Image (cartoon, coloured by chain):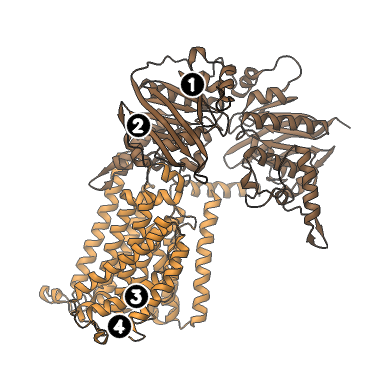
Amino acid sequence: MATATKEKTSLLANIRGRLEGVNLRQNGIFLALIALILFFAATTPNAASLTPGNWSNLVVQNGYILVLAIGMVMVIIAGHIDLSVGSVAAFIGAVAGILVVRPLEQDGWDWLPALPWWAGILGALLIGALVGVWQGFWVAYVGIPAFIVTLAGMLLFRGLALMTLQNSNIGPFPDEFRAIGNGFLDKENALGAALGFPAAYNATALIVTALGVLALLWQAINQRAGRVKYGQPVEPRTWFFVKLIALSAMVAYVGFQLAQANGIPFTLLLLVFLVVVYTMIMNKTTFGRHIYAIGGNLHAAMLSGINVRRVNFWLFVNMGALAALSGVLIAARMNSAVPKAGDGFELDAISSVFIGGAAVQGGVGTVTGSMIGGVIQGVLANGMNLNSVGIDSQMTVKGMVLLLAVAFDVWSKNRK
Amino acid sequence: MTQNILEMQSITKVFPGVRALDNVSLNVARGEIHAICGENGAGKSTLMKVLSGVYPHGTYEGDIVYENKVVAFKNIRESEAEGIVIIHQELALSPHLSIAENIFLNNEIKRFGLIDWNKTGQEAQKLMARVGLKENPDAKIKDIGVGKQQLVEIAKALSKRVKLLILDEPTAALNDEDSAHLLDLLRHLKGQGISCIIISHKLNEIAAIADKTTIIRDGKTVETLDMGKGKVDQERIIKGMVGREMDNRYPAHKSKIGAEILRVENWTAHHPDDKNRVVVDNVNMNVKKGEIVGIAGIMGAGRTEFARSLFGRSWGTNISGKVFINGEEANVSTIRHAIDAGLAYATEDRKRFGLNLIDDIKRNISMASLHTFVKFGLVNDNEEFKIASEYRKSMNIKAPSVLSITGKLSGGNQQKVVLSQWINSNPEVLILDEPTRGIDVGAKYEIYTIIQRLADEGKGVIVISSELPELLGICDRIYALAEGTITGEVTKDKATPELLMKYMTAEKGKK
């Protein structure tokens, strides 16, 4: 009996030893996502969650939340919060409507010509950044807590959205504008036809996926090699490759599925671009590193010469621009700017960030983690819809997932 | 029936992978002041946590005999009910509540289920009188000094009918006057039959007050010294703590002093909350290349305030004066400018102001000089790792790698990270505020060596310290500061504790 327990503990110790250097928290939620996908594959009727069309839906339905989550995780790492992003998205959707569709002749705005779609989007992003300038000014230079500033912003910009739209909707948008939210790269599969591909597969999607996987492999291996060269500790080799192969397989699988639907959504391309850029900003630029420093210890950051006000200010400008981008995506997808757009999205974005491993006290969090957090929520909602789970149960489950994810986080932190 | 109020017998406490306490025994006689000494990490705090029930009965081996019976505390509440009260180094007071409210926190005087405020005030005043605290019981904790806060903690302990009082580093944050008052109070309480265990790094205080001293090293009891018998002095205690004679606590050093590197002229700063209150008053000072200059002063003299106002105006308002670095007037209007001008300031409170405790050593070391790692707009984290690893070696930071989290390091190692951070910003002058506070003897020696190395490299070093022996031991020249004014300047060969103390306590306008 005694020897049996002893063997058991030594086996556990052995496993624990092998897992040393493996980041439990980061990898844990990734594994949770995979488990969730497998669960819905098994439970939805005819494995409906795995159909190409559903994968495509999953991406375009969650894109705007994920865009918000990118800005939100940065704000949260610095120790702030932004409750206004849903309202800002609605406001910017309305602004985009006016700039591109222009239905407000009766107010004496008829001198303003309808802008081309791209100029409208640029204008919308610029005004989003100005919203950020407004909120950043109060947070960074007046010193009002972001919770208050953005709570006010939540009302303020919802009100401005209503005013701008005068309680009606603006639409429809031009096709090019709609494509950002609804369009696909080479939807007609012109490339496939030219190359003589089977019509069921979108050739562009396959090629882009293959390039994406190659880039992923190259980046991961290159980064590891660089670290090894400098004698930095790295994850165990086997674990590294298992993880890398699993990740590549997943990307390839999703790409393959999308190729059988309409191809790669523009939203997905945009997201991948943003995730790459913002991950780099957070890890490799002084701006990103200063955000972590401020969230980790504000006083220490200040005393080491970091211009905390400036960082906070630009954080909110950035959040404003990303909220604007999200607003454009929503308007494009709905093909109309409506006053209720983005209602409650701030909460989805905040949940994504915390499910993704960020700390409430600030200083901790990653862009990729938040993306996984957002996708977990998306997969959950999507799977429950396919299983015809009512909205009441869905909300309950979402609440529990957020709570348990953070509880797991706290538990794994205390265990050390 | 023994004379001992407490006997901890063969206590062993094991954490995963570490034997924190190994067969430790501690006997405290009734009405005795018993000191526990040991380097950081020796197991002092663990022992006290076992005693007070933070580590409940069953998680350790050995017996605790208290008041002649074996006790098995499951939590702090149970130990407090028996009259064992522990006062931690970080005081457990609520800053926005009054003194009276804090004294009876979680122990409120109630009548018909409601708090009886009249009785609370009355009882609080009695307790305050017992500890010699002259304040309004309705004053808020945040408005009284640390010394008085410490007294509130003791009053709180008395309200719980304490029989065995445990103080963890009670005087670490106190000035000499407050420390002396506290030690007097402990003697007084001893007269009333209250036993006391005191953990302290300040060996002179232990030598002055303790009846017995138990020394712990690496989780084992080394010896218990009877302070009354024979000559037990600081050197004797240190010998027990480090396991060897420490002939010299300060490394020998001959400074090669060069040209003037820093000159401060007519520096004046006002309190940020009260623009009329002058805290730094017309300070003039200078530092030369390769020179170690000390700033002595009692707490509240304005040492930290002077340093921080100089360092990018990070403290105070309405600041005036001129700063010259290498003979040229320097712009120190913001912290960034000050760093660029060649100043560095390592804070007295590394946990609050110095380190990002949730991040790793590497990122803390690069914090003040991150821009130097940037290539094509991106931080080269491999280079960062390399430089940080070099500091880990040269500064002897004890951690498996620079990816270790700073919050988990000991005080001495954290201080080395802070120093690395500032050395890497490549300053001309380093201001080190209490560089050895809360650090064990061995690590202190290392810090002194680092300070001397910096001076040898041609930097100017300013050391602010509350410990006079430290200043006398390592500085080439010492300024004394009192009420924000420089009241004296002495060179190493002429400096004595008595002379410095005279300057430090000089009253304004009566030099």
The residue nearer to you, when weighing B239 against B463, is B463
Horizontal side of residue A115 vs A158, given as left or right: left
Q: Residue at x 86, y 30 (%)?
A: B2
According to the image, label 4 marks what residue?
Answer: A336
In the displayed orientation, state which residue is furthest to the top: B493
Q: Amino acid at mark 2?
A: Pro
Mark 3 crowdedness (10 Å alpha carbons): few <14, some 14-19, many ≥20: many
Q: Which dot, 1 or 4, sits closer to the camera?
A: 1
Mark 4 crowdedness (10 Å alpha carbons): few <14, some 14-19, many ≥20: many
Q: Which dot, 2 or 4, sits closer to the camera?
A: 2
According to the image, label 1 marks what residue?
Answer: B478
According to the image, label 3 marks what residue?
Answer: A91
Q: Is residue B284 visible?
A: yes
Residue at mark 2 to residue at mark 4: CA–CA distance: 59 Å
For the residues beneath circles 2 and 4, the answer to whether they share a chain is no
Give how far across and how far down residue B13 sits, in percent. Answer: 66, 39
- Colour in which chain A is drawn: orange
